[in-house]
Amino acid sequence: MDNKKLDVLRSNVNDLDDKILDLLRERAEIVIEIGKEKKSTSNIVDYDREQKVLDRILQHTKAKYSKDSIVRIWREIFQASTKLQEIDRPTIDTKRSINLINIYKGGKSSLKGKDNIIKLSSNENSYGPSPKVLEKTNIKEALSNAHRYPNIDGAQLRDKLASVHNINANQIVLGCGSDETLLFAALAFCQDGDEIIHAEHGFEMYSIITKIVGATSKLIKEDKNYKVTVNSILEQVSPSTKIIYLANPNNPTGTYLARSEINEILNKLPKNIIMVLDGAYAEYVTKEDYDNSFSFVDQFENIILTRTFSKAYGLAGFRVGFCVSSTEIADYLNRVRQPFNANSLALFAAEKAAPYIHPKLASTTTKIGTDAPVEIRVQWEKEENKNS
């Protein structure tokens, strides 16, 4: 491009920027006046009003900028407007979404004056890990290198998981619990002002993670049995949607989507939207139409499947989980994953536990369907037979 022409074009952009600044000044003055008219000086955000503004702008925009970019720009303007209307602003401030987070609280483990409490709130595996894991775990061996950092990416555990589940180790990313891998997805693919879809009655961390990255939650409508459907999920998709969090099966509703329903969603979903299928309770499902394998990763590029060692494997105290995706997505997730995010004891225990769950639990979960990895089914059946 000719330098003179380039200079003229850039000068035109500068003139437009000046006009935008003038318009922003006028808008700010009106926003301040609106703030004075509001009855509350603390709860000044009107999210319904903001959504109506966004809907109107998206309907009328003729700009060549993408619609999700337009939404992000206006959501930034909304946040700036909020600060203009706040009378008593704190000295130390954070982005608006952080202030909306309700800190996650675990269930009570004890009650004053009560013994033998049965704790259900965290869905812990009351049997603990398989006896095979206890037999194979040498605590002295595990602690012998406690002065050394763990393997930076958990290569040994990933290799073990790859062998057990017949997948590529490069498709596996480890987390401090599977909920850390949920966070990785949002950090990698969301910006301030984007949207994340999740169910109203589901894992509380979906909403928290959404706010951490400055995104906005779009809640999936549920039927009278608290189940989400293919249509109710897809109805929430917009140009700003970046991630769908879907617990399958879902806690606490006990509902699930069948293999065919997940397949339908993925076939209809725009390929730039990531579906995160949270399988924390996958090992407990006994329905034949439920897919507890990792086969969706071979069919679709835009899916992340998560698993945890906290539930069926009885290692909640070690905080280790993992996710499986395409190698391209796994590469993005590793870019936001902190080094050494899984500690040595967690890696050691999880590697021993990978093929096993407790035989008493296995007796109710071994019949989870023919799609379970063969090695796991064989190990479960062997343990069940030995302890029957």
Image: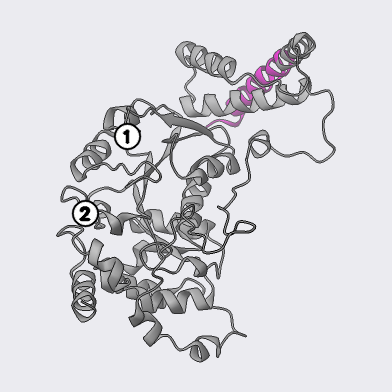
x 53%, y 56%: residue: 336
Q: Is residue 349 magenta?
A: no
The mark nearer the N terminus, 1 or 2, is 1
Q: Residue at x 49, y 43 (%)?
A: 206
How many C-alpha atoms fall within 10 Å of the one at disc 1: few (<14), some, or many (≥20)? some
Q: Secondary structure at mark 2?
A: loop
Give the answer, above or below, for where 219 lies relative to 289. above
| Residue nearest the viewer, comparing 184 with 207 | 207
Q: In percent of the image, x 51 and y 46: which residue is there? A: 205
Kindly tell me whether residue 195 is visible in this rendering: yes
Q: Which residue is labeled 2 in the image?
A: 286
Please say whether residue 151 is visible from this viewpoint: no
Position in image of residue 109 (x %, y %):
57, 59
Residue 167 lies left or right of residue 367; in this view the side is right
Q: Above or below — where is 259 with respect to 239? A: below
Q: Does 201 appear above or below 51? A: below
The residue pinned by badge 1 equals 227
Work out whether 299 lies above or below 139. Answer: above
Using the image as rendered, state which of residue 329 and residue 94 is in the foreground.
94
The picture quadrant where one finds residue 362 is bottom left
Residue 334 drawn at (x, y percent): 48, 60
Q: Residues within 10 Å of mark 2 (few under 14, many from 20)?
A: some
Horizontal side of 191 relative to 272 (left or right) equals right
Examine the structure image and report whether residue 11 is included in the region drawn in magenta. yes
Q: Which residue range is magenta in the image?
A: 1-23
